[in-house]
């Protein structure tokens, strides 16, 4: 290759075609600022991102709600940018700025935007439960990856209960006649210093709105409301399906005393459409009000799964984004969750599953985005408020129509209400189930195709393309430019994106298209950097490209080594094509050899050489000393 000098390291590996995955495969960073002019963001951890990375941007909250302390509390008045999401690509990382390749959708940082790495695979096997980091109030709750080939499921994908948080805080106190004027209110500060106020309403479940009025029976968008004093149950969280209301007050209070159960979260169904193209966590369930320290927690909402592939072999395994049961523990295989003398918690709303699969090839895939059941009460002497059921979530596919019973098993049911079992007959005591979710088609993953980088590239070169791609045992680096006064290009590689070593130097040509083959790339993750050197010697960089390649040694051995005259490739079982280079990368000769056939070395001077061996099974570079 004219004008090209290749510097090689010695190794002996081949590319492994299929990956195996389990556990948490994504990295999550909170977006702290957005520069729409430069199409860039700043995050709380830029170390997760390198040039060429696929990323997911998603805004978790930001809806506006009514804050009037009446039955309208928590109604959504404007969705704003909540639920916006997209795939994008990292164009460059400079200091605290991550520049993105494609024009972003609108986002509002105060609405909690996160940027998530999107791992890339060819064929991939899920060998253990695949999940996500739990939502922590800033990041997590989303599992996303892409596979150009087949995803084989030998274990579940499960983000159940990893979405919006349950209601957890309830000040212990209150009685039937205590502070009665506020007992039916919809919004309190549950941390209020006055215990007479704080004990009136348990905490709401988390939803798509940001609010400080976390206590009281009012829903919080799709988050369920907390039960009010005295011992009312919490409302269920919602997603596509509405959350169920919690159960009524203690039966020990006089009939003239009003019930004030937690209100179930509102349905987000109107925002799930091809035009809107938004996605959401399941809302958290509200907590039951307590005065005996046994009030039940709500359940967390379900998380989000986004999977893009050519096909999925489910093998009967499940993709789960269910809402969590309200309460503390499952008592047995048939009952829900139970307390013994206070209000019970609402179930979490079901989450969201997006399956962008070519030709709707979803063999044996079972999907679940069910709402969680409300928790029970079990007091022997009286009834207390059970929890409301969580609303069902969403399963959204690219093509086809439901039900796809021959390929895809879908359940998006609302959670059942809790029951009061202590007094005969067993009854829901006013608690309601959650509404069913939905199975949708015509999915189109959000990604703007318009390139938008106006701030980053200051060199007098317009880069039309720039890529580093694994190719057998090597990596192909290619780029195309509309040039001005650059004289040559340098390709460098690194294992840590900090310390670089030159791979090739290429002189400017008339076509503007360039390609370099790195014959000895690093194992695992490595980074390639392209720099352009101008006529005056100034070097300017076009950014990084990340390559991830898994390799394993073959059984080929050169014998004898050192050698004189001829050498054999022990372990070669078929014909192979051999290229011989000196240590500077100069090609010495090429030869096709059969299994057991020696390679003649008589034309070579004494010294160190590299043999690139390619067969239909593998590709490997071996070191040879000629004496």
Image (cartoon, rainbow, N blue to C red):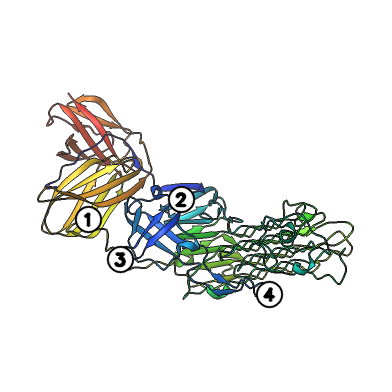
The quadrant in which the C terminus is found is top left
Q: Which residue is mark 1?
A: 479
Instruction: Indicate the quadrant where residue 405 lies.
Output: bottom right
Horizontal side of residue 503 vs 426, given as left or right = left
Q: Which residue is mark 4?
A: 71
In front of the other: label 4 or label 2?
Answer: 4
Neighbours of disc 3 within 10 Å: few (<14), some (14-19), many (20+): few
**Separation of marks 4 and 3 at Cα, in angstroms:** 47 Å
Secondary structure beneath dot 4 equals loop
Q: Which mark is residue 27?
A: 2
What x and y, as percent, mark residue 115?
Answer: 44, 57
**Separation of marks 3 and 2 at Cα, in angstroms:** 25 Å
Secondary structure beneath dot 3 equals loop
Instruction: Indicate the quadrant where residue 460 lies.
Output: bottom left
Point 22% across, 32% down: residue: 598
Residue 361, visible in the rendered structure: no
């Amino acid at each position: 290759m004219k004008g090209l000098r290749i510097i090689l390291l010695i190794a002996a590996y081949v590319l492994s075609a299929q990956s195996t995955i389990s556990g948490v495969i994504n990295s999550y960073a909170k977006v702290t600022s957005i520069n729409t002019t430069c199409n860039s963001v700043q995050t709380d951890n830029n170390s997760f991102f390198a040039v060429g990375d696929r990323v997911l941007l998603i805004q978790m909250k930001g809806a506006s709600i009514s804050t009037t302390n009446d039955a309208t509390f928590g109604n959504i008045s404007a969705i704003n940018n909540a639920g916006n999401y997209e795939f994008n690509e990292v164009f460059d990382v400079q200091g605290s700025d991550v520049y993105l390749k494609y024009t972003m959708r609108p986002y509002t940082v105060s609405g909690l935007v996160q940027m998530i790495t999107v791992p890339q695979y060819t064929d991939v096997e899920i060998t253990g439960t695949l999940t996500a980091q739990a939502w922590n109030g800033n990041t997590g709750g989303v599992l996303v990856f892409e596979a150009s080939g087949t995803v084989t499921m030998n274990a579940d994908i499960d983000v159940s209960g990893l979405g919006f948080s349950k209601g957890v805080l309830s000040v212990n106190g209150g009685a039937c006649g205590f502070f009665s004027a506020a007992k039916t209110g919809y919004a309190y500060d549950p941390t209020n210093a006055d215990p007479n106020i704080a004990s009136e309403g348990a905490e709401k479940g988390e939803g798509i709105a940001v609010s400080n009025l976390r206590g009281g029976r009012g829903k919080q968008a799709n988050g369920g409301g907390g039960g009010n004093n005295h011992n009312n149950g919490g409302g269920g969280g919602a997603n596509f399906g509405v959350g169920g209301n919690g159960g009524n007050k203690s039966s020990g209070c006089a009939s003239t005393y009003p019930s004030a159960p937690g209100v179930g979260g509102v349905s987000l169904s109107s925002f799930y459409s091809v035009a809107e193209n938004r996605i959401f966590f399941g809302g958290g369930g509200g907590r039951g009000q307590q005065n005996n320290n046994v009030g039940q927690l709500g359940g967390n909402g379900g998380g989000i799964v986004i999977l893009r592939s050519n096909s999925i072999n489910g093998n009967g395994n499940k993709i789960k984004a269910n809402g969590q049961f309200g309460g503390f523990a499952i008592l047995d295989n048939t009952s829900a969750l139970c307390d013994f003398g206070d209000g019970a918690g609402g179930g979490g709303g079901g989450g969201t599953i997006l399956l962008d699969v070519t030709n709707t090839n979803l063999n044996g895939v079972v999907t679940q985005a069910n709402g969680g059941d409300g928790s029970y009460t079990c007091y022997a002497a009286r009834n207390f408020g059970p929890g409301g059921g969580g609303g069902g979530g969403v399963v959204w596919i690219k093509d086809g129509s439901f039900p796809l019973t021959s390929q895809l098993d879908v359940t998006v049911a609302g959670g059942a209400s809790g029951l009061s079992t202590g007094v005969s007959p067993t009854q829901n005591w006013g608690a309601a189930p959650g509404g069913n979710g939905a199975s949708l088609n015509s999915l189109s993953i959000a990604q703007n195709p318009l390139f938008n980088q106006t701030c980053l590239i200051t060199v007098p070169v317009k880069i039309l393309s720039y890529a580093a791609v694994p190719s057998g045992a090597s990596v192909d680096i290619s780029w195309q430019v509309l040039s001005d006064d650059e004289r040559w290009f340098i390709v460098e590689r690194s294992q840590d994106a900090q310390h670089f070593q030159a791979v090739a130097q290429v002189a400017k040509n008339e076509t503007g298209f360039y390609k370099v083959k790195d014959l000895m790339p690093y194992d695992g993750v490595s980074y390639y950097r392209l720099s352009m050197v101008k006529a005056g010697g100034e070097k300017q960089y076009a950014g990084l490209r990340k390559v991830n390649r898994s390799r394993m040694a073959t059984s080929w051995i050169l014998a004898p080594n050192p050698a004189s005259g001829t050498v054999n490739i022990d372990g070669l079982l078929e014909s192979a094509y051999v290229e011989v280079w000196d240590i500077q990368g100069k090609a010495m000769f090429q030869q096709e050899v059969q299994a057991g056939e020696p390679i003649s070395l008589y034309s070579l001077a004494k010294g160190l050489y590299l043999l690139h061996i390619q067969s239909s099974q593998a590709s490997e570079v071996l070191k040879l000393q000629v004496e």
